[in-house]
Amino acid sequence: MRLVVHVAGLLAATTLLSGCMMTRDTAEPATLPAATASLPQPPVAARVDHEITQLGRTRNDPYNWLKDENWQEVMRDPSLLKPEIRSYLEAGNAYTRARLEDTTGALRDELFKEMRGRIKEDDSSVASIHGGWAYYTRFREGGEYAVYARKPAADAFTGAGEETILLDGDAMGRDQDYFAFGDIEASPDHRFLAYGTDKKGSEFYEIRVKNIETGADTGVLIENAYGDFEWSATGKAIFWVLRDVNNRPAAVYQRDLATGKDTLVYEEKDPGFFVGLETSESEEVIFISAGGHTTSEVHWFPADELNPVLRTVAPRQTDIQYSVTHWDGAFYIATNADGAVDFKLVRAPLSSASRAHWQDVIPHRPGTLLLGTHAQKDYLTLMEREGGLPRIVIHKKGLTDSHAISFDEAAFDLGLAGGYEYDVPVLRFDYASPTTPDQVIDYNLVTRERVLRKTREVPSGHNPADYVAERIMAPSWDGAEVPVTLLRHKDTPVDGTAPVLLYGYGAYGITIPADFRTGRLSLVDRGFIYAIVNPRGEMAKGYQWYLDGKLDKKTNTFRDYIAAGQHLVDKGYTARGKLIGQGGSAGGLLMGAAANMDPTLFGGIIAAVPFVDVLNTMSDESLPLTPPEWPEWGNPLTDEKAYDTILAYSPYDQVTKLDYPPMLITGGVTDPRVTYWEPAKWAARLGHEAPGAGPYFLRINLDAGHFGASGRFEGLKETAIEYAFALAAAGKIDSVDLSTPE
């Protein structure tokens, strides 16, 4: 029973080219110039010529020295970071602390208290029932980390029953600079619990097993693991995914729990393919997936088979994607084969599941994107997106009877959640909207009755009627209509005076949902309009919407985002210079590109773990995400067109003397997705090329990775810094002036 699903984050790549010559072996340590006019000054990074020749093209990367060549070791132990690099990062943090954090201290405290006040500190999840037990998570008052527990299934919703604490996150995370759980799964007989932990933020997990009955650790230790693992149905082994030296999930092993022996089950030879592992909802089959962004291959074996012999569903074929569900004695496969751009559903027998045996059961419907499937004994649920919004469609066995679950709001988010065993005809799903807190709903598949199990409590109070949510379409440069979701307080005027936080992502087909986030209310209650843009590169309007925002069409993403901002100006929601751009990871790339294309549109930019050094990152085959992401961005090592396209928009390479707005740029030393040197190099070049603009606040977490500080309250402190910056950049703090001194 999986208690928590490991989420590998959204995003981009990391950095740099091998075989390049440096003109100097080491760089000078960064220094802080003397303060002028009583204001602190940003650090000035040394410039060291570093010429890179590629495909007959030569570029100079003077801040290459900020990349520690021993980055793999640094991921595991941040203390190994070179002193001269650490010196520059610490100097940047010191400047940001003195100029931004210290000057907004009272506001940040206020924001933190507000956001914390909207969190039910002793919150708990709705229990998931499996094998006679109700599994759930809860928090303590003041606790940073979750407690994982169970009680008898009969007491799942009664409030009674004796609790067994399985894992105490607060105790385990105490005195750790960083702490996060990966997968947590009970054994098939529910006597043992396997769990993963990451104590560096580098996403190298350790997997351990404890005896639930005694509370004792069994001594099992699996190191260098990815977050995903699965129990054998026999309970005698754990199948787990190895992260290689380049931090890539590259192989599946079987750990024999009796002998401690690891046996290789599957090894992926293509560095562009990542490996995943999943047990079917029926619990009869274990799937091993290997794939990149555009190509899939799935292998399987019976869940009770030890030292398994792999069967292949369908051999990989370039640009053919598929995912597999085991249901009703067959495989049901969602795929884009045969030109099904928005995917179709096919059926194949277990005995011969290759493409030659695929039979269409739900044909391709252009404009209706098939997002995924969920199997229960007599029902197959499809998650789809149509008209830019998600929907849930239920199919009864035989696929002759189907119905959709309806919702009334103009913009909302849906998610499927497992809450019951396979043969129980109840579907659990999550619902939220920009104004409606998250709800957990149990849907009876037979009677179609909905049972509201939980609505997210906002202890400090929340009245949805105080807020207005809108969904509009912004015309882009070529007439394409870009979805934008807006949230504002009912008292905020639409007369051009309000600042707008313009959030964007725009890559990998990941669509930012119209969901509910309590933190946003701290801005909205202070007169901001919060806007979520779904540009091309996401899948808000189908798979073609994604295809039209990648590779040589990547600039559509940036132009869509800018067009959305300008549309809000034209419609009187805000004015030029009053938009605060925000994006993280690939969304940070969007921030950098937008700043280069139209800097005066923005009053400030928040770029979290920004993927901004695109050309160098996509040219470094050793980095974790680079080979798998060539189908997303192009391969500048072999493709001249890809090189020139990336160079033309890469934010780091295109920095020049422009009137950039103030920027808050963040990163983490142990981040395997966007390495710390990307934001560090970008901030350095901004300061050199456009010193009279900005200012540029570099904030690098020296003890965390891609997802920032661990713990639910420490993370809020980072959000408070971002929102204080946004308020200051929008001129909402009279005592703070972010203009750069002469």
Image (cartoon, helix red, strand yellow):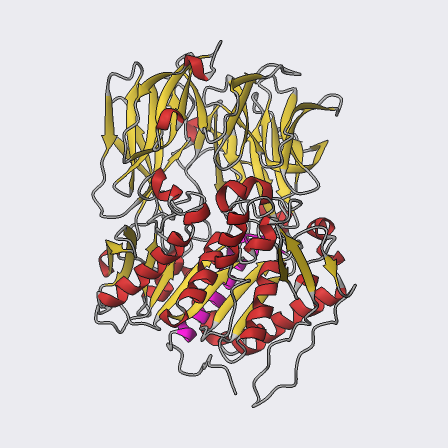
Which quadrant of the view contains residue 422?
Answer: top left
Give the residue at x 49% y 77%. 693
Which of these two is toward me, 740 or 666?
A: 740
439 over 337 or under it: above or below: below
Which of these two is toward me, 77 or 147?
A: 77
Quick one: which residue is furthest to the bottom in this view?
Answer: 37
Q: Position of residue 256 (x, y in %)?
A: 70, 22
Which quadrant of the view contains residue 263?
Answer: top right
Q: Is residue 186 left or right of residue 385?
A: right
Quick one: which residue is furthest to the top in this view?
Answer: 351
Q: Position of residue 49 (x, y in %)?
A: 70, 66
Q: Is residue 49 left or right of residue 103?
A: right
The prevailing secondary structure element of the residues shown in magenta is: helix
Q: Position of residue 293 (x, y in %)?
A: 49, 37
Which of these two is toward me, 328 or 430?
A: 328
Give the residue at x 63% y 29%. 268
276 over 583 or under it: above or below: above
Q: Position of residue 10 (x, y in %)?
A: 49, 46
In magenta stretch: residue 727? yes
Quick one: which residue is furthest to the right in this view?
Answer: 25
Residue 116 appears in the picture as rendered: no
Give the residue at x 59% y 41%. 627
Residue 140 appears in the picture as rendered: yes
In magenta stretch: residue 711? yes
Task: Tell me how many marks there are.
Answer: 0
Q: Which residues are magenta?
A: 704-729
Which of these two is toward me, 227 or 276?
A: 276
